[in-house]
Image (cartoon, rainbow, N blue to C red):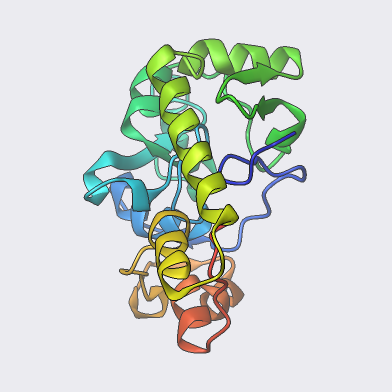
Amino acid sequence: MSIRPFSYHRVPHARRHGPQGYIDYTSYKIWLRDEFIFKCVYCLNRETWYPDLSTFGVDHLLSRSSRPDLECDYDNLVYACNECNRFKSNSDGAPDPGNHGYALLLRINRDGTIEGLSSEGTKLISILRLDRPKLIEWRQQLIKLYGELMRRPNSLQKSDLLRNYFGFPNDLPDLRALRPRSNTRPSGLTSCHYVLRSKGDLPGYCE
């Protein structure tokens, strides 16, 4: 059974944003934060578990060495932690989350171990070293923390801890203030997480 803090989505990711025209691919990072809900698309580590955003960056699904023409193509970019980005390097073996529901490829177990549910999932584990002992231990700790918090009686402290560890970061970007050269999916601006929070529609838990 998938554990909620580490649950991949069963359906392919439908992009909500489509900024275009930046000449430096790192300029898309602020958009990708919101696009992939403030966590690494590969290992599911969350921004709220780290002290600053330097732990996360932009990864190219098809590497710059193999497809330099896609270096600044938003749909070729994902949000990833630096460790996954480093292990992936120039590999082009990561399935596009826009074409694959990762829950059909990977499963994280209650003890923090990870399984490949398909040949693509097994390959992704190998490329990104998602089964390395330190990462398994880290997942075990977060799964245990989540379980202990959920067993507590409802209280303000419980809500605060769940929000701090498993909710959204405080610095949600207001994407409406950005000015890319063009945007192929402008409707996503009205549903970015900053807007949802301002309207009171942001859930307490970051899925």
Q: Residue furthest front?
A: 153
51 left or right, relative to 137: left
Q: Is residue 174 visible?
A: yes
Residue 116 against residue 78 in the figure, above or below: above
Q: Position of residue 110 (x, y in %)?
A: 63, 29
Q: Position of residue 178 (x, y in %)?
A: 34, 73
Q: Is residue 44 visible?
A: no
Residue 129 against residue 17 in the figure, above or below: above
Q: Residue furthest bottom?
A: 199
Q: In the rendered image, which quarter is residue 90 located in? A: top left
44 or 91, which lies in front?
Answer: 44
At x 40%, y 44%, the residue is: 72
Q: Quadrant of the N terminus?
A: top right
148 or 93, which lies in front?
Answer: 148
Q: Quadrant of the C terminus?
A: bottom right
Q: In the rendered image, which quarter is residue 112 located in? A: top right
14 left or right, relative to 138: right
At x 47%, y 60%, the residue is: 162
Q: Position of residue 28 (x, y in %)?
A: 37, 54
Residue 36 against residue 195 in the figure, above or below: above
19 left or right, relative to 16: left
Q: Position of residue 119 (x, y in %)?
A: 73, 12
At x 77%, y 31%, the residue is: 104
- Count of labels in the image: 0
At x 52%, y 33%, the residue is: 42
